[in-house]
Image: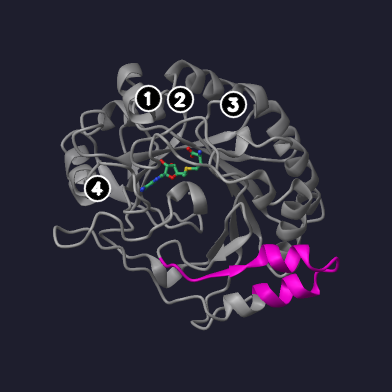
Amino acid sequence: MQDPFGRSISYLRVSVTDRCDLRCVYCMAEDMTFLPRKEVLSIEELDRLCSAFIRMGVRKLRLTGGEPLVRREIMSLIRSLSRHLASGELDELTLTTNGTQLAKYADGLADAGVKRVNVSLDTLRPEAFKAITRWGDLDKVLEGLAAARRAGLKVKINTVALKGVNDGDVDDIVTWCGDQGFDIAFIEVMPMGDIGGERRLEQYWPLSKLRADLEQRWTLTDSAFRTGGPARYVDCAETGQRIGFITPMTHNFCESCNRVRVTCTGQLFMCLGQEDSADLRAALRTSEGDEKLEAAIREAIARKPKGHDFILDRRATNVSVSRHMSVTGG
Ligand code: SAM
């Protein structure tokens, strides 16, 4: 699958639910209204959809949400999709999770052929964790991470950089990731979805500044390492770990974009930062065969935009894309 700019689309991220057991302040409003179940793709529909993309050239599949591990029957979807790993059609099946359910699922994930997971964690201070997630319990996530390690899953920690919230935590997170053998990536907060009262601008902490802060303590060297995702990496001499920076705001990484995203209602977004989408649920639900679905995917890829244009300044509102991150998934 090639888009109009010659980029090969080989990476699909699928949100399997809009629900989450946390309410991170930069991600969701506290009183989120979730979708009626009938609007959300069934496990069978998700399987059909992912399998169609894989037939069409997707080599890497990431399940996300909402929180993917709170979706009922999630393990049967993962076990079923793992047939594409076994056949060699898919290189990687992975997920992004908040880690609260990992203690329960880590072994099952490893058994199904999942090799690594991204776990979102913005602080190691229990009180701050509760404040950021509104009702999360840090111990549960740490237990989940320990289970992931025991199960042999490689872990990458994703930390959203939040000015005035976790700016004092990054050295501890880097040290801890080094001790645990986890990779780490910092992410700039993006203006996605109304989060109820909070001002994005107040939370925004450019990673150029975060990196400068890290360099006060750590020796960082630019690395050529790439995962196929948007992160740029440095090597940290003291911990021997890689540190990633995902900078949608300060550095536009669209030129090498190889990915598209599907929401839990089957809307295909060709760009995280644009509103244009294609309705794959209609194609799934109105036809038993997959021809209609494949045609809808092809048509949508043919209009993948060149890039996104997140704007976060004092003249703009604090929302540049109306949907929450939990809709399109991280
Ligand atoms: N529940 C899972 C988790 O916590 O990783 C998967 C979904 S969550 C929406 C995916 C990632 O998006 C998380 O790392 C989260 O911190 C990040 N995220 C959510 N809203 C964001 C925003 N406005 N800007 C930047 N990252 C955001």
- Left or right of 69: which side holds 90? right
Q: CA distance from mark 2 to mark 3?
A: 19 Å
Residue receiving disc 2: 180
Q: Earlier in the sequence, mark 1 or mark 3?
A: 3
Q: Earlier in the sequence, mark 4 or mark 2?
A: 2
Q: Position of residue 294 (x, y in %)?
A: 73, 73
The three-letter code of the residue at mark 1 reads Trp
Which tag is nearer the camera, tag 1 or tag 4?
A: 4
Query: In the image, which disc is placed on residue 200?
Result: 4
Q: CA distance from mark 2 to mark 1?
A: 6 Å
Taking the spot 23% from the left edge, 42% from the top edge, the residue there is 203
The three-letter code of the residue at mark 4 reads Arg
Q: CA distance from mark 3 to mark 4?
A: 29 Å
In what quadrant does ligand 1 lie?
top left
Q: Which residues are magenta?
A: 274-297
Which tag is nearer the camera, tag 1 or tag 3?
A: 3
Q: CA distance from mark 1 to mark 4?
A: 28 Å
On whether ligand 1 comes within 8 Å of the CB at mark 4, the answer is yes
> Pointer 2 and pointer 1: residues touching (CB < 8 Å)?
yes
> For residue 261, what is the image quadrant?
bottom right
Residue receiving disc 3: 101
Q: Earlier in the sequence, mark 1 or mark 4?
A: 1
SS under mark 1: helix
Instruction: Using the rendered image of the protein, determine whether residue 89 is visible from the camera's viewpoint.
Output: no
Taking the spot 65% from the left edge, 52% from the top edge, the residue there is 39
Q: CA distance from mark 1 to mark 3?
A: 21 Å
